[in-house]
Amino acid sequence: MSALKSLIAAAAGASVIAAALIGSTVQPRTAATPGTVHFTASGDIAARAESAAVLSQVDALDPDLHLALGDLSYGATGAEQTWCDFVTARVGAGFPFELISGNHESDGLNGNINDFSACLPNQLPGAVGTYGRQYYVDVPAVNPLVRFVNRLTNNRMPPRRSPYSSAPLDNCAAPSPLVPGDEVPSGPGSQLPTTFREDAVTQNQLTLVTVVTPGQANRVRAVMAAIDALAKRLTPPGSLIGVSTIHFVKWLVIDDGRRLMMVSDYDGSWESYIDEFAEMILSGLDAIWETAYGYPPDGARDVPAFKRFLRSHQVPSEVFFSAYPEETVLNMTNDLNFARACADAVGGRPQATLQRL
C-alpha cells in the first residue's frame, strides 16, 4: 500500500490523517456519547470470510464512522459494486464507511476509486476535498472534537475525465455547448428567463433536450422500450425503480431522431431529484444519455459533471401548473389507498379495509 495513511489524535483538537473527500449534503450522525468520537479503521480489506468477520465486528461496535484505508477489494476492475454490496450487507446502507484510495484503486489494478466512491459515497456532513482521493472532515459537524485529514502520496491517481467533475454547479451562468456538435436548447449565451422559478411549490418541472449522435436514434428507442417494459412490470405504483418522488417522466425521440427530450414533474429540489436519480438508476441514465453529445465520460457516477450536462440542456419552464401544489407522490399514494379502503368499507369488506389502512 503506497498511500500515506497516518493517524494523529488528541482530545479537543485532534487530527486524523488517513485518505479521501466530498461535498454533498449529508445529515449529521449523532454521537453515541456526547463529547466523544468513536471510530474504527482498517485497510487491505478484500472480500474473504475474515473480511466479513471484521466488518461484522465493526457493525457490532457501532462506531460513529469507519475509515477504509485503501486497497479495498482486491477484486476485478468492474466489480466495484459487488464489493460495495459485500460491505453494506454487513455494516448497513448509510453507515459512514469512509473511503480513501490505496495504490490498488488508484492505478486500476483492483478497481477504480471513482467507482468505489460512487457505490459507497461519503456519509459525513461538511467534508471538503475529493472523496476517495484527498479530503478532510470535522467530527462531529457541530462543535467538532476531531478533524480527519485524508492525504495521499505516491499514488498515480487517474485524472477526472471531465473538467466539471470537481466544479460546483453555477445555476446562474448562461449555458454553453459542452463539446463540438452539442447544442443548448435555449440558445448559446441565453440567460434564464426572469420568470423562471424552482421550489415555488412542493413539485418542480424539468424539461431537457439533448442532441443524439448520428446513427444512434434506434439504440435510444430500444433503451426507452426496455425501461418502459421494466417500469410497467416490476415497479409498484408511486415508484420508478426505487425513486418515489416522480409524478411523471417521459422520454421522447424527436426531430427525426436527432434529439431526445425528457419531460418530468417531481417532488423536492432539483439537486435532490438528480442525486436520487444518480444513486438509484445510474446504469439506466447512462444507457439513456451515453449517445448524447456532451455526456460525461464517467457517466452519471460523476455527479457534478452529470448535473452540468443536465443544466446545460434544460429548457426553463416559464409556466408550470400544479393542481395539488402541496401534495407529494407519497401523499397521493396514501390518499388513494385511504379512498379505496373507504370504498371497501362501504361495500361490506371490512377485512380489505383494514389491510389497506
Image (tube, helix red, strand yellow):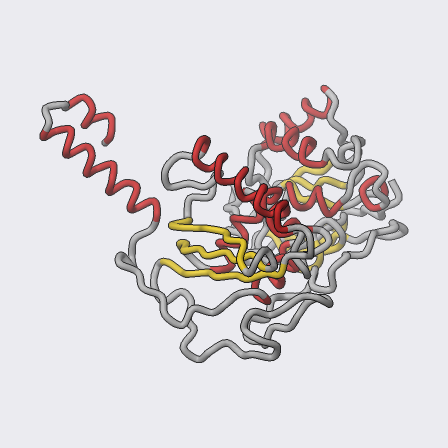
Residue drawn at the location 67% of the way across and 66% of the way down: 182
Residue drawn at the location 52% of the way across and 61% of the way down: 208
Residue drawn at the location 14% of the way across and 33% of the way down: 343
Provide residue 320's location: percent of width, then percent of height.
36, 66
Q: Is residue 238 above or below residue 194?
A: above
Provide residue 173's location: percent of width, then percent of height.
59, 76
> Seen in the image, is 352 located left or right of residue 70?
left
Image quarter of the C terminus: top left
Can residue 14 be seen in the rendering of this structure?
no
Residue 94: image quadrant is top right
Can residue 264 be seen in the rendering of this structure?
yes
Residue drawn at the location 54% of the way across and 52% of the way down: 275
Q: Is residue 169 above or below residue 221?
A: below
Residue 297: image quadrant is bottom right
Q: Nearer the viewer, residue 334 or 32?
A: 334
> Seen in the image, is 212 located left or right of residue 349?
right
Q: Nearer the viewer, residue 208 or 191?
A: 208
Image quarter of the N terminus: top right
